[in-house]
Image: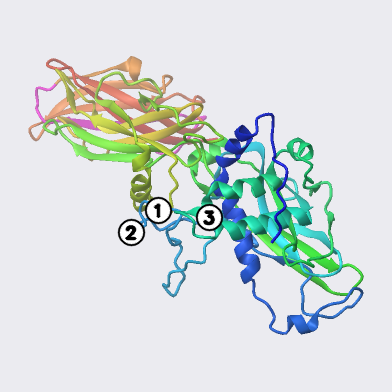
Amino acid sequence: MSNEVPSPITEGGGSKSLLKLAVPLLALFGVVFGVVFLSQNAPKDPDAENKAVKPGEGGGAEPPLRFFTSARAWDHPDLNGPYRDLPLLAPSAMVPEDGSRTWAWSLQDRIAQGVYEPSPDVRRAPFWFENRNPNSVTVQLKGVSCSSCSGGRLAALPAEATKHLLQHAALAAIPTGTLSGFSVGMIEPAAGLFAEPAALQRAGRKTLEWTEYKFEHHPNAKFNVPAANNTDGWSPQWGILELTFTVGGKGADLLSNPGTQVKPLRAAFATQVDGTSRAGGNEFMIAYEVAPGCELSRATIDVGKLDQLSGDQTHKILVFSSTRGPGSEFGDLTVPACLVQTATGTTDTGGFFEVTKVERVPDTELVSTAVWLEAERKRPARVRAAYWITLVVRPKVGDKRMEIGAIDRTVAVSTGAVVQQLKVTGMLKGVVRLDDDRTDVALQTFKGGEGTVQKVTILTEKTDTQLALVDEECSPRFYQYELTKQPNRGGLGCYELKITVPKGKQYGNAKGDIVLEIKGGSGQRVRIPIRGSATF
């Protein structure tokens, strides 16, 4: 083994540079260790040594390039059981159809981001390979699923960099201490590959020379890989094909479909051993989700049927982010602001619906929170930061009572520029109801040019209950509303509500509310939704 000591790599600070590299060390080690392991354990043809290819020959068993992986996707860990607090060591949560567990997961996939917010930033997925041929190899793009949002670049690792990396990996494997393989001994060779080019040049090291294309402009992009020259057994000709992509998505689409699974990015390449007739091909896939900066564990709360004697209800909702948290490129998840709105979009200040508490989930509880969320949503969950919000629903506040009728509220939950909506639905039964026990007034379909008139009957449990129309709060405002007392019916009070839609005033779907008030006492109100459709 060589005793050569490479020149130190500094960026104006020596040890500070190494400390900067130590922060993402786990990610780098996952790549490097995975490549070393796969290169040493890649399937080999038992007769390959007897079929060695000489320069210019066209036969042989060796493929043009050996890629160690061909897909990249976040590997969701199974955190149920003994690995609950060891996500990097847990088996994959994806169980094959035969029910067997597999440990053949990739550390690169385990620590992959997997979920992105839409942005113009360029994302990168590296695929390492080895050329074992004594000839150079040409790599050419044959097709890609999204040329406008993707590109690629390729670099061949310098022989001395590969040698340095393998020798340090061998030393790191010696059991000199707990997790020695993840020790700072891997920082130096990793820095030799991924440090800033200027720092490498000052240290007299060769930098990675990338050939890069935007596939939209170069649909037949070509790359070249040098021939193998591994005479000492420590200098295989490795390289990195890095596919680049940007993550798009419309804000409105994400709000209605959080955690949107987009179609994977797929790219196909042809490989040719130069000077021979031997050719091959490789296909790559990158799977990821697009998500907003924050999501809710549920989109609706149904409080059921309430009455005058119903007590308060308490509901807890998780506000979480798959992309934001401490150290995230997207920033931390800010404290949610909550605003309760009525069906018409005005702020509800009555106190019947109130967010009483907002609590940050401690980092130590994020794993258990993710396990809970996965069971709640019946799909894999990644939680980088989260808050619990507590919503209290009160049928009565002091002397005031909630409006009788359909419950329709929206809690707007905002973190930064991202706003999610929590719908609260149900029914409050009271002393006033429609005679057919409907929860709304359904106008029959009518021609907008002719208008329409519809009458409905409203009953009260007591014959002496007095109702009044709150005309200024009824909508649509251009409708005409008229409430008339009718003779009592079977021990119940009775009113007729007449709704007039003027000619030529309504076209398309009609939506609004009729507001009544019970005179005397608490002055409780009744809100009855109105729906309909007007044709041309």
Residue 460's place in the image compared with 203, above or below, is above
Circle 1 packing at 10 Å, graded few (<14), some (14-19), many (20+), is: few
Circle 3 packing at 10 Å, graded few (<14), some (14-19), many (20+), is: many
x and y percent of residue 532 in the render? Answer: 42, 35
Of residues 263 and 424, the one nearer the viewer is 263
Image quarter where the C terminus lies is top right
The three-letter code of the residue at mark 1 reads Leu
x and y percent of residue 153 in the render? Answer: 77, 50
> What is the distance, in whole Å, between disc 3 and disc 1 at their CAs?
17 Å
Q: Residue furthest front?
A: 3
Q: Nearer the viewer, mark 3 or mark 1?
A: 3
Residue 395 seen in the current view:
yes
Numbered mark located on residue 82 in the image: 2
Q: Which element is circle 3 on?
A: helix
Of residues 525 and 305, the one nearer the viewer is 305
Q: Is residue 293 left or right of residue 488?
A: right
Residue, x 44% and y 75% (percent of image)?
A: 98
Q: Earlier in the sequence, mark 3 or mark 1?
A: 1
Of residues 289 and 363, the one nearer the viewer is 363
Q: Which element is circle 1 on?
A: loop
Of residues 168 and 426, the one nearer the viewer is 168
Residue 445's place in the image compared with 183, above or below, is above
The residue that disc 3 covers is 181
> What is the distance, in whole Å, between disc 1 and disc 2 at their CAs?
8 Å
Circle 2 packing at 10 Å, graded few (<14), some (14-19), many (20+), is: few
Q: Which element is circle 2 on?
A: loop
The residue that disc 1 covers is 86
The three-letter code of the residue at mark 3 reads Gly
Q: Which residues are magenta?
A: 443-465
x and y percent of residue 44 in the render? Answer: 68, 77
